[in-house]
Amino acid sequence: MVKLENLSKIYQQDIVGLRNINLHIKPREFVSIVGQSGTGKSTLIKLLIAEERPTEGRITIGGWDITNIKRSQIPALRRQIGVVFQDFKLLPQKTVFENVAFAAQVCGESNRKIKRIVPSALRIVDLEDKADRYPRHLSGGEQQRVVIARSLIHRPKLLLADEPTGNLDSFNAQEIVDMLLRINDFGTTIILVTHNSEIVNSLKKRVITLDNGEIISDKKCGKYTL
Amino acid sequence: MFSSFFRIIKFAFQNFYRNFWLAIVTITILVVTLFSITALIILNVISTQAVKSIEDKIDISIYFKTEAEDIQIIKTRSELLSLKEVKEVNLIDREQAMVFFKERHKDDPTILESVEILKENPFNSVLVVKAKNSEYYPEILKVLDKEEYNQIIEKKDFSDHKIIINKISIIKTKIEKIGLFVIAFFALIAALIVFNTVRIAIYTHRSEIKIMKLVGASNWFIRAPFLVEEFFYAIISFLILIAVFYPAIDFLQPHLNYFLEYDFDLISYFKANFALIFGLEFLTIIIINALSSFVAMKKYLKA
């Protein structure tokens, strides 16, 4: 699903984002990427959604070489990747339904299709009964579930979750992780970037550890070792 | 396709009312720019008409010596008429000159009496020449510089008219130059205001734009509402111009006739040239808006 070959991202003044990353994530895998702040986790996410371009190496997603992706092709790439960030990025003036529908509207989906796909996305995150509420009326965990529902609107084969539990208490954090596991069960590849050792250890899934922009460990059933 | 189109229109309206006062300022500046362009066109039309009206009144009189024979005068007239620069040549012979003089001074018995005292007709024959264009007069007069004409022509002069025409032409050119500067100034201000409006609209919608990019909205879909919004501004300012313009020239018309000393229908002129004048103005304002919007979007809407 994701193949990174000799991937490096060097910023100005020789600041290393990532250095010589070689990684292969198979379809339906659930991979946690861990590491301290500034080790290149978010840089990796930015490279995968083509927000930044690599200095060296190659990125392939679902067989598509996106290393030198054209600007006009970026929207097509992003429709195939769901993204969940730590800050919820919900629109406060829109209801839960409208927030999820917004992602479909701006990509040109018909109103009929939106009426069909939004409830099913909300059903996956158990928020069907709160479709008419505004984000301010939801808990942090619920807001993050709305973001997950929005990220699922295009039925992505790959879901990137960058610190999705960073702003949540342990109960809500576990709820989000359970949701990601459920989505993984449906066949979506998940890349979870996190600091939360408790979650990583409870997952018993593949763990990749980054340090100073390099992979220092890649274990099939790993633990948070930093 | 249609749903995307309606959504773009909807987002454009949202931009409009979320930054309502900014929209008002933008429209005001666009209206001022359109007015400055229209005012320059009016000034240009008026100055062209003024020059034309003065040129229509201009002619040159060629006064013949008393000894000039009729055959020589008729030959001179024929030669002048054969010139392509000449529009018409009228001959006023000595008798007609006397009749015109008496007619002109019919209310002044002293002058009439003094003419009666003279035994001979004191007036000489005159050729009144009108050129197709005032610029041709010096060329026409040059033809009459030949020796054969010098013997029979007493006086031919054009210098006073030339000074007036030159002065008007200089004023006309200056008005055009100042007008172009004023238009360029307002166009620049309008471009900067539109640029700023788009920049603020992008800032106001930064959350939506961030989400749009994240979920894969096309660059065109993200940009289109800002262009549509600027298109609204252009249409609204254009409609305001049309609504205010015709009453304004209706007010100007009588003053203009007084100034030009003959009837020139400015309203009819603008009605006849509506498509050309206002079409070009609309195109100008659309180009200003589109260019400013593109520059602002290129700067603030990176991938």
Image (cartoon, rainbow, N blue to C red):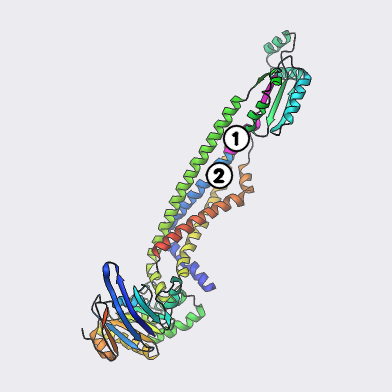
Pointer 1: what residue? B51
Q: Amino acid at mark 1?
A: Val
Q: Residue at x 31, y 74 (%)?
A: A9
Left or right of residue B32, residue A6 in this image: left
**Comes first in the chain, label 1 or label 2:** 2
**How far across and down, in percent of the image, does residue B268 sit?**
64, 45
Left or right of residue B88, residue A207 in this image: left
Span highlighted in magenta in the image: B47-63
Q: Main secondary structure of the magenta part?
A: helix
Asked whether residue B236 is in view, the answer is no
Q: Nearer the viewer, residue B86 or A67?
A: A67
* SS of the residue under disc 1: helix
Q: Residue at x 69, y 16 (%)?
A: B107
Which labelled disc corresponds to residue B41?
A: 2
Which labelled disc corresponds to residue B190?
A: none
Q: Where B87 sits versus A217, above or below? A: above
As measured in the structure, the alpha-carbon distance from the residue carrying label 1 to the one carrying label 2 is 15 Å
